[in-house]
Amino acid sequence: MIHRRLVRRLEREWQTGGPLSTSLLPISHLYAALTSLRRALYRLKLCKSHPSALPVIVIGNLTVGGSGKTPLVGWLVETFRERGWRPGIVARGYGGESQHTPRLLTADDSPATVGDESVLLHRQTGAPVCVCTRRALAVETLARDTDCDLILSDDGLQHLAMARHLEIIVIDAVAGFGNGRLLPAGPLRERSERLYRADAIAFRHAAPQVSAVSDGLVLPGVGKIDSQALPVSFGFALTAPRVRRDRTQAWQPLATLAGCRVHAVAGIARPQRFFDLLREHGLQVIEHALPDHHAYVIDDVQFDDGLPVLVTSKDAVKLDGLSPGEVELHEVAVKAEVDSAGSIVVDTLSDALRSKGSSRSR
């Protein structure tokens, strides 16, 4: 419990700064030196990136967690399919057992083994998904054992051993880069200047936007964005929340539960967003925040008052194997709604890959 409180305090200070964050700055400076050295070793080819027979697009973050990246990967799978591609997905499998050899997901795989987000993407998209701590080996497996002709990497921006053709960096336009500090004093995995070297930027907004970025956009932790120096960009929001009671029931708009008092349980990077979403649609929420990638036990969703219990889709996949008994358990799902620039960006990326001949014959 003490450890959890300390982690939550640090996560708060990642947004605003504070004494705990400041005390960790020397470690952040060491982290910065080590990551710069690591990039230099790859740049000088003293460390090797493993090339792929198929084009690889990395969808990653500069910050730790909570940017909406996984729903965006689902949208990208469908959007590239519309352009004639057959996408597959590689992931590390966070929240599951460390897979040191590639593992192609099947319908029987559980989040405890291969990670919650991997299972969720496999179910939602139907695309082949391969998890491995060495993502380059997962890419090789998809190229060899499936008919994929395009690989999307869910995260992995800093996994330099995996060669990539294109990079999409996902940025939370509300949270930005927090206090602007590198790990562990702040949420940044890399310095903010890194976003200018990407092939595309996806800005997550609180609500759907007409345009992705403007000259006046200011991000916490970095200040005003130089939009002229950015690569192509688009905006998206997580919208259209719907709810269902277990996987056998039909989806209903979340607003059908308006006025209900519910328990909201969330083991995600930013649980407050889930709670706020429920309140925005008229629900009376009792909050239960758990750590990201939390390994659920039945007691996490059992309460004495008999009220409905609502969880995110990411949490729901981890509750399948449990027996909730009399618990009225509901899954809440959202989808990525992308602005008009999104399709144009995907067209640009798709054309760039085809112009390089980076596709398996169809």
Image (cartoon, rainbow, N blue to C red):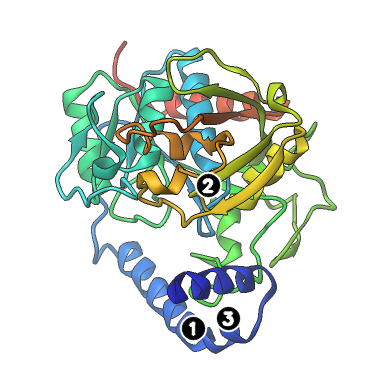
The residue drawn where x is 22% and y is 21% is 146
Q: Which residue is mark 2?
A: 266
Q: Earlier in the sequence, mark 2 or mark 1?
A: 1
Residue 128 position in % (x across, y down): 30, 25
Q: Which residue is mark 1?
A: 29
Location of the N terminus by quadrant is: bottom left
Q: Give above or below for 277 relative to 66.
A: above
Residue 130's disc number: none
Distance from label 3 to label 2 (Cα)? 25 Å
Distance from label 1 to label 3 (Cα)? 13 Å
Q: What residue type is disc 3 on? A: Ser
Residue 291 position in % (x across, y down): 46, 57
Residue 7 position in % (x across, y down): 50, 71
Which one is nearer the viewer's eye here, 343 or 336? 336
Q: Which residue is mark 3?
A: 21
* Residue projecting furthest to the front: 304
- Res. 236 in view: no
Q: Give above or below for 70 relative to 150.
A: below
The residue drawn where x is 72% and y is 36% is 283
Label 3 SS:
helix
The residue drawn where x is 24% and y is 51% is 133
Location of the C terminus by quadrant is: top left
Q: Earlier in the sequence, mark 1 or mark 3?
A: 3
Nearest to viewer (mark 2 / mark 1):
2
Q: Is residue 194 left or right of residue 114?
A: right
Q: What residue type is disc 2 on? A: Ala
Query: Around disc 2, counting alpha carbons within 10 Å, would you say few (fewer than 14), some (14 to 19), or many (20 or more)?
Result: many
